[in-house]
Image (cartoon, rainbow, N blue to C red):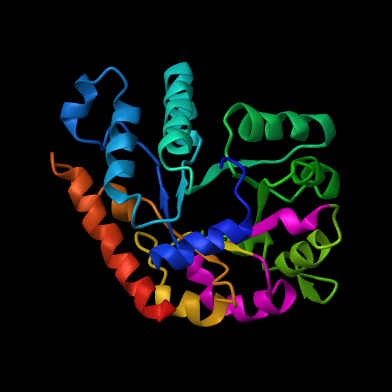
Amino acid sequence: MTNMTTDQLVKEIKRKQSFLCIGLDVDLNIIPERLLKEEDPIFAFNKAIIDATHQLCVAYKPNTAFYEAYGIKGWQALEKTIDYLNENYPEIFTIADAKRGDIGNTSTMYAKAFFEDLAFDSVTVAPYMGKDSVEPFLAFKNKHTILLALTSNQGAFDFQTKTVENQELYKQVLETSKTWNNSENLMYVVGATKAEYLAEIREIIPDSFLLVPGVGAQGGNLQDVCKYGMNDSVGLLINSSRGIIYASKGNNFALAAANKAAELQKEMKAILG
C-alpha cells in the first residue's frame, strides 16, 4: 500500500488513536556514538526509532537535507529507510520533507524522484513559483503534495503574513491553490506556533489535511492546534522531530523515543475522545 489515500490515513488515525508524525532528521553529531560503528549509522538509527515507535504514530517525515548533507551514503540511507517502511509498515504515511518547487519538467522530475523512485506517499513543496511549479506534483495519482502555507519559523513574517491587496499572502496561497488541477491532492504545512491563525485557515480549506510542525522543541501547543485546526476527519498530522528522536543520547535512545511518542499519543487519544 505505497499509494496511501486520505481515507486510509483517517482509518489509521482512528485505529491508533494518534495523529502523530515523527520527523526523522538524523544528525551524526547527535546520535548515540555506538551507532557510528555500524555500516550505515543513519539507517541503523532510523530502523531502531521506527521499530520502537511505529505503533504510536501514523506518519514519518525524513527531512531530506539531513540525508543530502552526507552525499551518496546519506541518499542510500534515505532509500533504505523508505524501503524498510514500505515493506514492513505499509500502513504508515510517508512524507519526503524536501521543500521542492520549480517550473514544468523540473518539477515533474522532482516528483518522479520522490513518488516513483523512492515511493513516498507525499512531498513538501514551496508555492512561491506558483501554479506551473506545483501542478506537476499534483498530477501523480494517489500521491499528496504538501504545500508550505504558514510556517513555524520567525522568518514566516517576512512574506507570508504581509498584506497584498487587502489579504495576507498565505491566505492568497491557500485560495489560489484550490483552483489548481487535482487540488484534492493538496495538503498544507501550517506551523504549530501559529495556532491562532488556524481558525481562519480552516475557513478557507475546511477539509484538507494540515501538516503541523513545531509541537515540542519549537514550543507549539497541541491543545491549541487541535482546538482551532481539527476537522471532522481530524485533518491534522502533528510533527515532532528532535523532541522524540533525541529524547536520549544513550543506548536506550529508541526506548526513550517511544516513551516521548507515547506521551503525545496519550494526549491525542484524550483529544479524540
Q: How many marks?
A: 0
Residue 96 drawn in magenta? no
Does the stretch in magenta take in 201? yes
Q: Residue at (48%, 37%) from the top-left corner?
A: 86
Boundaries of the magenta span:
182-208
Of residues 240 and 209, the one nearer the viewer is 209
Nearer the observer, 66 or 258: 258
Q: Residue 196 location in percent, x, y? A: 55, 79
Q: Can you give x and y, in whole percent of width and height, for residue 216 in the image?
A: 35, 63
Q: Residue at x 34, y 58 (%)?
A: 56
Classify residue 159 as left or right of residue 197: right
Say above or below: 266 vs 6: below
The quadrant holding residue 271 is bottom left
Return the x and y of residue 39 as percentages of the image width and height.
28, 17
Question: The C terminus appears in which quarter of the rendering?
Answer: bottom left
Residue 25 falls in image quadrant: top left
Q: Is residue 247 visible?
A: no
Quarter of the image with the N terminus in it: top right
x%, y% of residue 88? 40, 37
Q: Tell whether 205 sits left or right of 193.
A: right
* Residue 202 visible in the snapshot: yes
Asked if 213 appears above or below 44 in the picture, the reply is below
The residue positioned 55% from the left and 58% from the top of the image is 9
Q: Nearer the viewer, residue 215 or 218?
A: 215
| 241 in relation to 74, above or below | below
> In this view, which residue lies farthest toward the left?
251
Left or right: where 257 falls relative to 270: left
Q: Relative to 171, does residue 126 appear above or below in the rendering? A: above
**Residue drawn 80% across the image and 67% down it:** 175
